[in-house]
Amino acid sequence: MGLEIVNDVRTDYVCDLVKNGKREDGRGFREYRDISVERDVIKRAEGSARVKIGDTDVLVGVKVELGTPFPDTPDKGVIITNAELVPLASPEFESGPPNENSIQLARVVDRGIRGSEAIDLDKLCIEEGEKVWMVFIDIHVLDDNGNLADAAALGAIASLLNLRIPNERYGLTGENTLPMRDTPVAVTTVEIEGNILVDPSFDEGNAAASSVTVISNADGTLSGMQKSGSGGLKEAQIAEMVEIGIEKAGEIRGKYL
Amino acid sequence: MKEEIELIKDGKRLDGRGFDELRPIKIEVGVLKRADGSCYLELGDNKVIAAVYGPREMHPRHAQDAKMAVVKFRYNMAPFSTDDRKRPGPDRRSVEISKVCREAFNPVIMRELYPKTGIEVYVELLQSDAGTRTAGINAASIALADAGIPMKDLVSSVAVGKIDGEMVLDLNAVEDNNGEADMPIAMIARTNTITALQMDGRLTKEEFERGLKLAVGACHQIYELQRTALVTRYNQNYESKSKREEE
């Protein structure tokens, strides 16, 4: 109950600031916090990346294992994305089965990678109907200070780009890198008091009526989108969010991928 | 195995529709006795039933909101609603859809009138043919109105998608399975306010913008159908009541 009241107060504070063209950390509306991407941080994982956006800290680990393909796609590899909002990352996270927020986070990241066809799944097939590579993308949130989606998506693509396929473990030979074709990048914007802000901080995320994550590719096409939050948006606002999404994704891709 | 299927022939889709044409929609209001409000809806081959309970005491109590009603939304597919039997109970897909649908209604339901209560919306997909969440939202909207829940307006929903390189309205299952992108939206038609938006697949910015226009137009059509269904139903109630009184 205490947390709720604090969040209400902080929401009022953030909204007042935004009305005056300001943000709590002094950023411009279209400015990201500092981003850092550290690759290969986990030795046991085939691919991994730790992404920080401001104080938000997300670790993505990718494990690759041999498995059987799904019956409807016998000649394609498998991607499985999961996200854990572990209780160490926020006083608001609880242990237990995945809740709707962690499911949404995982599915949005998954949608971007799938929609862009970033991984050439045909090339992950070893033996049709029998053996394919299964790519498990696990998102581990360490510190939730807002905008988990962008950090998780960036961690996922950075991990995939640097991944080594464990051929030796299974007595196989072949390419050791993943057949990557694209670099989807997620950019989240929120609407507060009629203004569009990129990369919401924790308080801004709470204050926002609506938030839209736009995932776009190297050629500027879109490969996933998700609105969340209990507000409504005008067509023009969504167009602006898409515009910012494509522009910022280009900048992030150029600098960090 | 995915085979290449030609989804557009001579400017028409496989089911004979034009690019901007909805599937036939059938709506029945107040189909369930026990629920406070309900609606049966068909969108092409989708068959969906929605029921609303509440506002009533919110359980569990710690989930109550002291300032407003909490909307609970459960989207559920019947095990027999799909080609391969769907394992009963919530899966990750339905949990996400339930969240998106709930958020689509939050802007219209006047939650502040009923603090500490829950307004529960249950959507059951009996037969599915792509666009199930849009059919569910359209049905839930009417069920909420039928339950007498104060709302600023109805919510209308439709999907657009890309098949054979063209942006088309309201994909059916064949189109969805073989298409390049799918984008469901929900909106408040009167104010052109979008309350739900998802996209998967691959679209250019121009295709996205064209698709959004197409969807917005279709939501206005759906809104009229929803409104007509409600008005017709309550006219019937009124007429049968006045007839009884005359007798």
Image: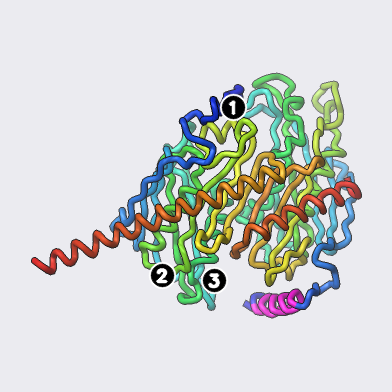
Mark 2 to mark 3: distance in Å?
A: 15 Å
Q: Position of residue B193 (x, y in %)?
A: 57, 61
Q: Position of residue A132 (x, y in %)?
A: 71, 26
Residue at position x 78%, y 41% from top?
A: A62
Circle 2 residue: B56
Q: Quadrant of the N terminus of chain A?
A: bottom right
Q: Is residue A14 magenta?
A: yes
Q: Position of residue A5 (x, y in %)?
A: 65, 79
Quadrant in the picture for residue A141: bottom right
Q: Is residue B118 above or below residue A103?
A: below
Quadrant in the picture for residue A114: top right
Circle 1 residue: A72
The three-letter code of the residue at mark 2 reads Arg
Circle 3 residue: B62
Q: Is residue A207 visible?
A: no
Main SS class of the magenta portion in the image? helix
Q: Mark 3, mark 1: which one is toward the viewer?
A: 1
Residue at position x 77%, y 66% from top?
A: A201
Judge if badges 3 and 1 mark residues of a common chain: no
In this picture, which residue range is highlighted in magenta? Answer: A5-19
Q: Callout 3: few (<14), some (14-19), or many (20+) C-alpha neighbours within 10 Å? A: few
The three-letter code of the residue at mark 1 reads Asp
Question: The residue marked by circle 1 belongs to what chain?
Answer: A
Q: Is residue B26 above or below residue B10?
A: below
Q: Secondary structure at mark 2?
A: strand
